[in-house]
Amino acid sequence: MRYQWVLFRIIFGLTFVLSGFVKLIDPVGTSLIVQEYFNALHLGSLSFLSTSFGILLSLLEFITGVAILMRMRMKEAAVSGLVLTVFFTIVSIFLLVFDPIKDCGCFGQAVTLTHWETFIKNIVLLLCIIPIFIQRKKFRRDSSVLVEWLFLTIYALLAFVLSTVSLARLPVVEFGDFKTGADLAIKLSEATEKGEFETVFLYEKGGERVEFTLDNLPDTTWRYVETVETSQVQEDAPFDFYVVDGSGNHITDSLIFTDAPVVLCSVYDVGKFYSATRWSELNIVRQSVEERGGVFWILAASTPEEMKGIFGDGVEDMFRIGYTDYKTAIAVNRSNGGYLYLHNAFVVKKWSRQGLDPEDELQVMEQDSDIVMIRGIIKQQLITYVSIVVLLVSILVIRYLCKVVAMRRLRSIRESENQEEL
């Protein structure tokens, strides 16, 4: 029976720790998932809470998993684990019945589960946490209350700092379609061959708005407004990357299928991005890219009219600007105004808005792009594996040390009792 409890704790604790961890390292991606849930529940007005809610929920999930694994504060952890699992199970039933979004987001973008897989996962977790909850008062404590809260607080603070750094700059580890090493040509061709989606675009002319498909785009007298995400077929798309120029012409292929290196500055919130200082910085980056034989583009989740209204009528004379939707821009780079280096359709390197020094960082354009990309992939893999190993080993070590201290304390008490009897 003892080993059964250990198995329950390991399954439940590991699942919660890994699930919370992968969402904490990509808080922007987590907020997008929360926004989808808010929209599905017709609570779009709460979207401003999506980032903070996503971080807090992921942090609670992570700490609950740590507590279960370390067998600390089991009463509180068991209650938290049961409440969260019941909540997740209800959500999975909602997904099964109504199918409002394509992915539950249980493990962020690291692992994609079908709705049935999500439901089965939650049932397994329920079967693990219910016995733990029933027996929550019978678990022996190996440390004092103060020590247990101290360790859990340290883990919570470290996880929160990690998430905050990822939010301010770039995710420590990225799992999305535009991660370092991603082949956009293959992704785009596979998505097209499968025929699993049909992107719909909204254009305007004379006050009239009409939806067009990729195969039926209007002439240049029509003004591109936005990419419409109403098609159920599009929501199931494995990869969607669509960019138009100021005239509404499709230019995605010219970004991906080109021999010249391309640097994209992805701006998903134009209003917050604009400032005179930042504008001069863009000019410096553009000049540095062009000096190295590259092409510099601004990828904006906006319309030509909005860009001209904020930056002036000459903005398209100064920069090459591609227009896309919000989800695509934020998928390209989580940092508003961050950069992506693309060469031969491969994502070679990424920088946050604050992390690019043109004179230093852009020297990678003079190096072999394959070598730069491979280094980036290896770095990401090392960070992933080392982070998980360090996390789990630290939990095991602390758990072992607490147990050793508890055993010594118990032995000392018994020796004292034996001496008193003598």
Image: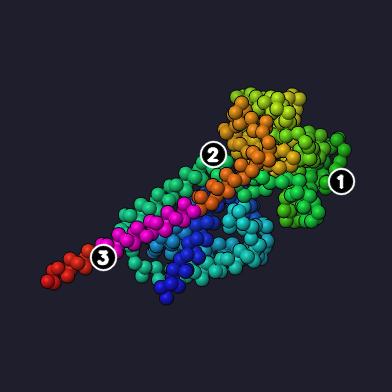
Instruction: Kindly identify the residue that appears in the image at 59 percent across and 62 percent down.
Output: 91
Q: Which residue is mark 2?
A: 168
Residue 122, horizontal then vertical, whole percent? 56, 66
Q: Nearer the viewer, mark 2 or mark 3?
A: 3
Q: Nearer the viewer, residue 183 or 370?
A: 370
Residue density around tag 2, few if under 14, some if 14–19, many if 20 or more, within 10 Å: some
The secondary structure making up most of the magenta span is helix
Instruction: Kindly identify the residue that appears in the image at 47 percent across and 64 percent down.
Output: 10
Q: Amino acid at mark 1?
A: Asn
User: Is 2 within the magenta?
Assistant: no
Q: Which residue is mark 3?
A: 410
Q: Is residue 214 visible?
A: yes
Q: Which residue is mark 1?
A: 216
Residue 55, horizontal then vertical, whole percent? 52, 49
Residue 309, horizontal then vertical, whole percent? 70, 29
Q: Nearer the viewer, mark 1 or mark 3?
A: 3
Where residue 335 sits, quadrant-wise, is top right
| Mark number, residue 249 | none
